[in-house]
Image (cartoon, grey):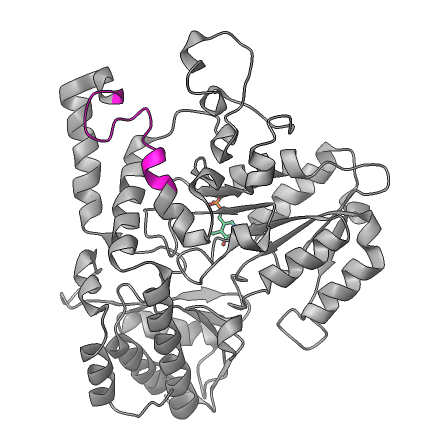
Amino acid sequence: MHFEAGIEFAQALDHEDPLSRFREEFSIPAQPDGSQEIYLCGNSLGLQPRRARDYVNQELDKWATLGVKGHFDCEFPWMPYHEFLAESSANLVGAHSDEVVMMNSLTVNLHLMMVSFYRPSATRYKIVIEDHAFPSDHYAVESQLRHHGIDPEDGLLLLKPREGEELLRLEDITALIEEQGDSIALLLLPGVQYYTGQVLPMAELTELAHQHGISVGFDLAHAVGNIPLQLHTWNVDFACWCSYKYLNSGPGSVAGCFVHRRHAQNTQLPRFAGWWGHDKQSRFRMENRFQPIPTAEGWQLSNPPILSLAAIRASLDVFSEAGGMGPLRSKSEKLTAYLQFLLKSEVGEYISIITPEDLEQRGCQLSLSCNARHLSGRQLFQRLEEHGVTCDWREPNVIRVAPVPLYNRFADVYRFVEILKAACEE
Ligand SMILES: *Cc1c(COP(=O)(O)O)cnc(C)c1O
């Protein structure tokens, strides 16, 4: 990819961007002076699709005018509402629609999946996660181990980058699996590492783990809506994701879950059950003999929060109109490559990029480690905020920046680097 310095070049890229009109679909937060923020934080909380308000209002109106009848005879009845999200969610993760369900929250889904897919025996009982796993994932896994009477000191294997390095190496993961594979029950890794932005080779890892009889789950919080995924073809056992980061579905909105068809159809799999996972035809007979739906829906517990699902439906419709992950990823590759180009050429002496340069190993996000003249990383981050940039800060010394293809412009990236440069040179 060829890039040039100067705002005119950024504007030209925006001009020829086939997705540029989608920015209008979103509410962009404003600065105190009324101008739009430079919002580069879609990896933490995606912006609101304008139509989310209409979709949610539609459900509030149905509630007001129909009461309980909103479950049945109307547009988008609540009873099957989650089914309206299945196909478009499945498209985003490369799954069949019977393999995906939107339910609960991310950490809850991780627990539910471990109930089914972490079945320790006396000899095969260890779980592999990364040393720098998101705290919630770490707590979930530790508590699962303890729940089975296993001391995490013994049962938890932590993958660490090499001394002095930030990224995980496939050969190190391979070595661990080859050494200890017989004692490992579950490999639970992120699709995109939240701190470094590194994309892990999910297809290779799944194949390798399966060769050693290990189940494989992915936390896709930072991967879904960001990079192309092929969960079904990769033969992943399960995956979970939240919907409020790149999926733009609102703070704390309902999460996603993938269960591979070969497991979903196995109604004998142990699970924690609830009535919404029970066979739809006989659910209301209330007979108390649990018969799971032979799809990912069989893991549902409760009837879901419709207002949240409405916001998800709004967001998924925007993804579909944009043509799905193909066009979005094309723009994203270019947008982040442009960010990388400007960072290197404008602030290369103050900023190093932790995220891999290789396109296959990164999504939207670049994680920057800071070494400005007079400001600490934290102060640099504050300076960015003062100038209308929203990105995020992670201890000890990382600023995470994520230009997202649905609503960020090349000009946002340009302006961000301009502000960053001024702060670095202070
Ligand atoms: C954002 C994120 C979470 C958040 O979990 P919730 O259950 O949605 O609060 C968990 N794990 C990872 C890897 C995340 O990035």
Which quarter of the rendering shows the N terminus? bottom left
- Residue 6 in the image: above or below residue 153: below
Foreground pick, 33 / 87: 87
- Residue 164 in the image: above or below residue 394: below
Residue 56, position as x, y percentages in the image: 22, 37
Count of picture labels = 0
What residue do we see at 21% from left, 79% from top?
16
Q: Could you tell whether 357 is left or right of 11 in the image?
A: right
Residue 349, position as x, y percentages in the image: 47, 91
What residue do we see at 44% from left, 55% from top?
224
Q: Could you tell whether 6 is left or right of 86 in the image?
A: left
Magenta residues? 71-86
Foreground pick, 245 / 267: 267
Residue 183, position as x, y percentages in the image: 82, 48
Q: Image quadrant of residue 12?
A: bottom left
Q: Could you tell whether 51 is left or right of 249 in the image?
A: left
Question: Is 84 one of the magenta-colored residues?
Answer: yes
Foreground pick, 163 / 259: 259
Name the chief secondary structure element in magenta.
Answer: loop
Which quarter of the rendering shows the C terminus? bottom left
Question: Is 264 one of the magenta-colored residues?
Answer: no
Q: Could you tell whether 177 is left or right of 357 in the image?
A: right
Residue 142, position as x, y percentages in the image: 68, 43
Q: Specify whether residue 337 is in view.
A: yes
Q: Image quadrant of residue 23?
A: bottom left
Foreground pick, 88 / 65: 88
Q: Specify whether residue 131 is in view.
A: no
